[in-house]
Image (tube, rainbow, N blue to C red):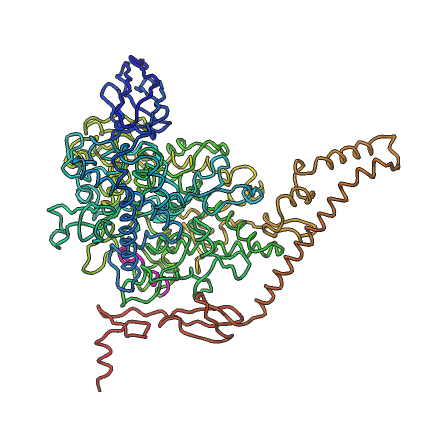
Amino acid sequence: VTPVFASVPSDMTVEVGTNVQIPCSAQGEPEPVITWNKDGVQVTESGKFHVSPEGYLTIRDVGTADEGRYECVARNTIGYSSVSMVLSVNVPNVSRNGDPFVQTSIVEAIATVDRAINSTRTHLFDSRPRSPNDLLALFRYPRDPYTVEQARAGEIFERTLQLIQDHVQDGLMVDLNGTSYHYNDLVSPQYLNLIANLSGCTAHRRVNNCSDMCFHQKYRTHDGTCNNLQHPMWGASLTAFERLLKSVYENGFNLPRGIEPRRLSNGYALPMPRLVSTTLIGTETITPDEQYTHMLMQWGQFLDHDLDLTVAALSEARFSDGQHCSSVCTNDPPCFSIMIPPNDPRVRNGARCMFFVRSSPVCGSGMTSLLMNSVYPREQINQLTSYIDASNVYGSSDHEALEIRDLASQRGLLRQGIVQRSGKPLLPFATGPPTECMRDENESPIPCFLAGDQRSNEQLGLTSIHTLWFREHNRIATELLKLNPHWDGDTIYHETRKIVGAEMQHITFSHWLPKIFGEVGMKMLGEYKGYDPSVNSGITNEFATAAFRFGHTLINPFLYRLDENFEPIPQGHLPLHKAFFSPFRIVNEGGIDPLLRGLFGVAGKMRVPSQLLNTELTERLFSMARTVALDLAAMNIQRGRDHGIPPYHDFRVYCNLSSAQTFEDLKNEIKNPEIREKLSRLYGSPLNIDLFPALMVEDLVPGSRLGPTLMCLLSTQFRRIRDGDRLWYENPGVFTPAQLTQIKQTSLARVLCDNGDNITRVQHDVFKVAEFPYGYSSCEDIPKLDLRMWQDCCEDCRTRGQFNAFSYHFRGRRSLDYSFQEDKPLKKMKMSKTVSSMKQSKYFHNATSASDDNANMPIVNDFKEFVLEMQKTISSLRSQIKKLETRLSKTDCTDEKGKSYSSNETWKRDPCTVCECKIGQITCFVESCPPADCEAPVKAKGDCCPVCIKESNNKKKP
C-alpha cells in the first residue's frame, strides 16, 4: 500500500535560538521510511537535526539559516507520498553574550592566524629536504594570491568567533561545543558585520560582470563565471561545494564526527581512520584487470584534477600557540591529526599521529556565517571550476592562465620548457621559491613543472598526461594560425582552448565513462537532451571527498616504463613511492613515452572489495627516509569527517536502496560475510559507517567498476556536469555541425600519437587491454581531427580574428555581412524589405524623391561612424605591428628571470642544464645521468651526476 500520512506538518514561525519539533508520520505496507528535505536537499541526523522513529523532525538552536520549505517524504517499495511546510524565524534585536569580547578577539585572531601562516610559509619554502608532511602541504598550497587571501579571511573569521566562544565559556561556565548552548546567541548582527569587514570576508566577495556577450556566447571564462547567465557563480572556482545531503557535524555546525573520542554515536565510538585503513582497506595482493589498462586510472585522476581541489588550511601550525600539528597530535584548529592505534606497526617507530589539517572554511559558512544573522554549517571551498573545461591545462583563474601562456609570441601558445632530443618540449619549470620537487640534495636538481593544476607533479604518470595535453594545445594553435593567419594571439588561444576542452569532454563521456559505468550506469546517466539552465553543475562535497576517490582502488603499486618494443627500459619500472614529485626522472630517464606506454600497454588493477588500496598508498605515501609516511585511505576517511559528510546509510536511502538497521541488511550490496564482520567490529552500528570505505567494499554492478550506491552518486554528478554546462560541446550552436563531427573523431589514442615523443603504435581504444603487436595499430590508421573546419572563410579578412578589437556595438550594427538578421538596424531591415518588394513590382521605375534623400541620411551618418571606428582600429593595429616588428628585429634573448643573453651565447642554468640563445629563442638541453652501480652515489657540488665514491677512489690509486 502506498504510504498515507497520519499526521502532517503546518507552517510555523519561531524565535531564534529555540528548539522546534515538526510533526509528520505515515502508514503503509510495507512500513514506510520517512525522510525530510530542506529546500530540495535531504536532511541527515546530526547535532542540528534529529528524525524520530515515527518521523518527527527536531531542529536544535534554530537560526535564520534554518528558514525555508521543509518536505516530509514517506517511501516504501510500492511508492511514495510527500507533504511540505514553511518555517519562518523571528530575530529580536537584542545584545548577545559575546558582544563585549569582539574587539579584543578580532585583534588576537588576526595576529595568531598571520603568525601561524607566516611560520608555515617560512618552513615550507626553505631549501631543505622535504618530509611527507611538507610534501602534502606544498602539494595543496594555493598558487593564486586571491585564493590565499580568501582562505586567510575565512580562518580569521572563524578564529575570532572561536575566541569569543572561549571568553563566553569562561564567563558562563558552560561547554559551547555541546548542544546545550545556543550558537545563535553568540554575537549580535551589528558586530558580525564588523568582524566580516576586519577579517577580509566582505572584501573578497566577487562581483560578476557578464555584460560582454560577444565573449560569453563563444568562450568560457577561466574561473567558470558567467557560464549560467541566470546564476553566474554556479560552477565557478573559489565557491562552496554543493551538497546532496545536509552536512553532519557533532555540534550541528563545524565539529567533525569523531573529534571527541569518548562521544558515542548510536551507542558506539567511531573507529580511528587509521584502524579502518589497516583492517579493511590496505592490501599487498593485486589482481590485474583483464579488460582495462592502467590508463583507465590515469584518465580518472587527470579528469578529477579538472573538477575539484579543496582549499586546505594555510597553516601547518595550530593557531593557539604556533606548534606544528604533527608534533602536538591534537585537534586544535586547524589541526585534525590522524591518531595511530596502539597496536599499529608504526607505533614501534615512536609515531603517535599522522599529519592532517582541516580544509579552509568558506566565508559565510560554519561559524563564519554568523554575519548572515545565523550560524550556517561549515562549508569548504572548491578551488577549481566545476566544468570539464581543461582547467588542468589552463588554470582556474586569470592569474593562473597568464602564468602559463606564452604572451611574447602572440601566437596563442602555452609556455614551453626544455626541448628534448625528440624535438618536442617539456612543460616549463615552475619559478619562485624552492618547490616540492627538489626533495633531496643527492637527486638531480630539477624543479617542479608548471601546468594548469598545481598537482601536476604528484606522480610521473600524471605529469606525462599533463605534458601530452600542453603539447596538444600548442599543436592545434600552430595549425589554426596556418589556416587563419589573420587571427591574433588571443583568438587563437581561446579557439584552441575551446577545442581542447571539447576533446576532453568527448573522451570522458564517450570512451571513459562507459567502461566505468557499464550499461546499467549509462542508462542511469541518460542521453544528452540539451542545456538545462536550471541545473547547477557545481561539484558536490560527497563527490570530491568520497565518491570520486574510488579511483584510488585502481592504482597499481608500480609505474611501468616500456620502450618502443614494449620491453622494460634500462632504468626499470618504478615503485609508486619513487614516482612521487620526481620530474627529474622524465628529464633524465627517457622522457614521457616509456611512462605513457606503461599506462596504455599494461593491465590496470582490478577493483576487488577485499583488495582495495595497495600498500604503496597506505604505508609509503610520499615516504622518505626516517620519516612517517602518510596513509591515503585514512586521509580520505578523515577528510570526509572534516567536511561533515553523512554516513553511508543516509546515502543508501538517498539512492533508494533499503534502509540498513543491521549489518545483515547490507548483504545484497556487500555479499562477503568477512567484510561485513569487519565493518561490525569497527563501527558497531551500520548507521555509523563512513561513506568512503563503504563505497569501496560494495560489490560491483555487473559490467561496471562501481557498486550500486557509488554508481548512483557518480551518475548524478556527471549528469549535472553535462546538462548544466551552457558551453557543452554537443549543445547546438557551440560548434558548427562540421566542427562537431570532427570533435567526435577525437580519441586519446590520437592525442598520444600526435604528442608523444615517438609513439607510433597504439590500440584504437587505449583504455582496453590489447596484446602487442597484434592488438595495436599504426598511428597512421587512427582517425585525425580535421582542423580545416575551423578555417575562417571571408573575402576581406583584415578585420576578422582581432580579439575584442571591435565592441559589440560595432559588430552588431556594422558587420552586416557577418551578423544575424535580428542584429541589423531596424530601419535598414524595413528599407531592405521595401526595396525588395518594389523590385518585384511591375510598376517599379527609376525615380528619386525628397523622401528618398531623407531616408538615406541615417545610412550616411552610420557610414561616418563606421569610418571613425575603422580608423581607430587601424591605428591600434599599426601600433601592435610596430611593437611586433621591433621584437622580431632583436636577436638577443631574455630568460624567465629577465636576464638578457646575446645571440649564439651559451650558459649553464644549473649543473645539468646548458642553454643557448639563437635568433631570439632560448633552447635548453639537459644532461642525462647514467645509472650508478652502487647503492649510495654521491654528487659533488657543481657536478650534475652522482658518482660512486669507491670507484672515484680506485681511479686515484696508482
Nearer-the-camera pick, 613 or 191: 191
Q: Is residue 69 above or below residue 362?
A: above
Residue 20 lies in quadrant = top left
Furthest toward the bottom, the residue is 958
Start-end of magenta stretch: 574-587
> Residue 782, position in %: x, y?
49, 50
Nearer-the-camera pick, 70 or 919: 70
> Residue 943, position in %: x, y?
32, 74
Q: Is residue 577 magenta?
A: yes
> Residue 383, position in %: x, y?
38, 46
Query: Which residue is pictured at 26% across the width and 52% down the height?
Result: 316
Query: Which residue is pictured at 80% across the width and 31% down the height?
Result: 837
* Left or right for 586, reference 821: left
Q: Is residue 416 magenta?
A: no
Which quarter of the rendered picture does the C terminus lie within? Answer: bottom left
Which quarter of the rendered picture does the N terminus lie within? Answer: top left
Q: Work out whether residue 769 can be spotted.
A: no
Nearer-the-camera pick, 299 or 84: 84
* Left or right for 745, reference 347: right
